[in-house]
Amino acid sequence: MKRYFYIDDDLDHLEAVERELLAAGVSPPQIHVLSQDDAGATRHHLHQVHSLLRQDTIHSGEIGALIGLGISVLALVIGWFAGLPEQIGWLPFGFLCVVLLGFFTWEGGLIGIQAPNSQFRRFANALAQGRHLLIIDVEPAQEKPLRTVVARHPRLEAAGTGTAAPRWLVHWQRRWQVFLQWAP
């Protein structure tokens, strides 16, 4: 999947674009709007970026996990060279590794809460000016309908591409929406 970013000044216009994308076969989990005007986006029934994903929590948590993994391996190596496992066993070192990994992952996530999502930082100026970011994740077969819809809306300003949500996650979100509509 590929992620496309578009910037626009008008939530009414973005609502019309979203309706056309849905009619063209793009599912709701593939379309998101990032805006400083959350109330306006809600009034227009736009699919907004989840609040957790507005921050860099996940990305920073992954970096923290990699650091924690490295420090855990370092602790194992130091313990092995010091000959400690022969004296006290490997269990305390295994527990230490789990604690270190968890701690650094947690700390990375806490650091990420304080920063905007790394994918959205480049749009900070546009968002601060009251503009809105339309984010569309499409599969290769959906690129032609996307281009058709975008061509009908010259006011949409192409703002680049990025890494899309994994296909399995989008599929799971579609199935979840179907389940919620089916459930009483």
Image (tube, helix red, strand yellow):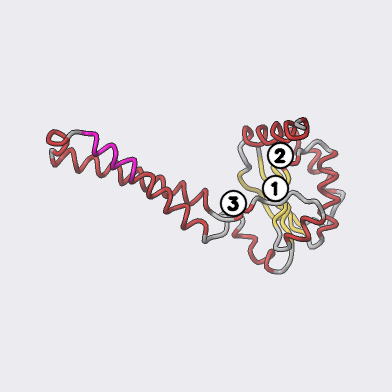
Q: Would you call the spot at circle 3 few (<14 residues within 10 Å), some (14-19), or many (20 or more)?
A: few
Could you say which is closer to the camera, residue 156 or residue 95?
A: 95
Above or below, comparing residue 35 to residue 178 in the picture = below
Residue labelled with disc 3: 52
- 175 vs 78, left or right, is right
Corner quadrant of residue 96? top left
Above or below, comparing residue 137 to residue 121 in the picture = above
Q: Is residue 34 magenta?
A: no
Span highlighted in magenta in the image:
90-99
Local SS, label 2: strand
Mark 3 or mark 1: which comes first in sequence?
A: 1
Q: Position of residue 135 (x, y in %)?
A: 70, 49
Mark 3 or mark 2: which comes first in sequence?
A: 3
- In three-dimensional space, the C-alpha distance between marks 3 and 1, rounded to whole angstroms, equals 20 Å
Residue positioned 81% across, 39% down in the render: 145
At label 2, the amino acid type is Val
Local SS, label 3: helix
Q: Position of residue 59 (x, y in %)?
A: 51, 49
- Magenta stretch: dominant secondary structure: helix
Q: Quadrant of the N terminus?
A: top right
- 131 vs 111, left or right, is right
Could you say which is closer to the camera, residue 126 or residue 64?
A: 64
Mark 2 or mark 1: which comes first in sequence?
A: 1
Q: Which mark is residue 4?
A: 1
Residue labelled with disc 2: 138
Q: Would you call the spot at circle 1 few (<14 residues within 10 Å), some (14-19), or many (20 or more)?
A: many
